[in-house]
Image: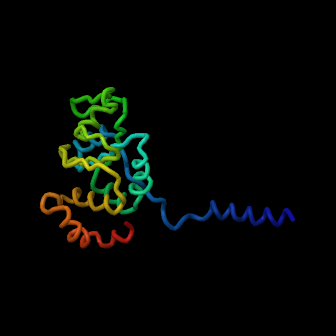
């Protein structure tokens, strides 16, 4: 009786490791530090997307799990932004150019996070910078993949320079990203 149980199990194990999946594993967002994004932007300018989070923030974790794993989000972010993960409560010094941002015990946050969020400490918050490292806009709060994709395409495609966000969502976005809407 044992032979009959072992043989199918052994065959299952061999097949599990021998068969290659038809689809390659999904590559995630290429996160980097703020310093790395600054250095890269000096060589090859690109917009910067900064996820300002904390270790205790539940909605930050939900966004990591649901929003930042969406295929269309990953693809657009990796193509159009340098993506940064910034722990707002990091005690490590952050050096951008000649400026060094330190941990501020009074605000219980790193000075870089305080500056990026303009003192409005809300988590999660996504901060958008242009190719010259100038502020476009910080946007606080959790966003589902569809909402997030609307924002990253609006800002990443420079539509914010020529049309209002609501008009963009109802017109340009639905036309330009029609195929992406299926997986959002």
Q: Is residue 121 above or below residue 131?
A: above
Residue at left offset 75%, top offset 66%: 8
Q: Is residue 104 left or right of residue 67?
A: left
Colouring of the image: rainbow
Give the image location of residue 75, x and y in percent: 35, 60
Q: Is residue 17 left or right of residue 126?
A: right
Give the image location of residue 175, x and y in percent: 24, 73
Count how many numbered circles sit on residues in the image: 0
In depth, the one of 83 and 183 nearer the eye is 183
Q: Is residue 76 above or below residue 119?
A: below
Residue at left offset 18%, top offset 44%: 134
Most extreme residue toward the left, as rendered? Answer: 162
Q: Is residue 158 left or right of residue 67?
A: left
In depth, the one of 124 and 153 nearer the eye is 124
Residue at left offset 37%, top offset 66%: 184
Q: Quadrant of residue 113?
A: top left
Most extreme residue toward the top, as rendered? Answer: 105
Most extreme residue toward the right, as rendered? Answer: 1
Give the image location of residue 81, x and y in percent: 28, 52
Q: Quadrant of the N terminus?
A: bottom right
Q: Quadrant of residue 35?
A: top left
Give the image location of residue 53, x and y in percent: 36, 43
């Amino acid at each position: 009786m044992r032979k009959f149980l072992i043989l199918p199990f052994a065959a299952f194990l061999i097949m599990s490791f021998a068969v290659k999946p038809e689809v390659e594993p999904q590559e995630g967002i290429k996160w980097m530090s703020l310093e790395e994004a600054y250095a890269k932007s000096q060589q090859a300018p690109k917009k910067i997307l900064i996820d300002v989070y904390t270790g205790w923030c539940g909605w930050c974790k939900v966004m990591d799990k649901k929003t930042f794993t969406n295929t269309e989000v990953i693809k657009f972010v990796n193509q159009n932004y340098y993506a940064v993960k910034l722990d707002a409560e990091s005690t490590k010094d952050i050096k951008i150019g000649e400026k060094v941002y330190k941990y501020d015990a009074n605000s219980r946050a790193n000075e870089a996070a305080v500056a990026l969020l303009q003192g409005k400490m809300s988590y999660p918050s996504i901060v958008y910078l242009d190719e010259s490292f100038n502020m476009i806009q910080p946007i606080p709060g959790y966003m589902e993949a569809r909402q997030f994709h609307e924002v990253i395409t609006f800002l990443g495609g420079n539509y914010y320079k020529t049309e209002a966000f609501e008009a963009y969502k109802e017109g340009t976005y639905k036309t330009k990203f029609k195929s992406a809407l299926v997986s959002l």
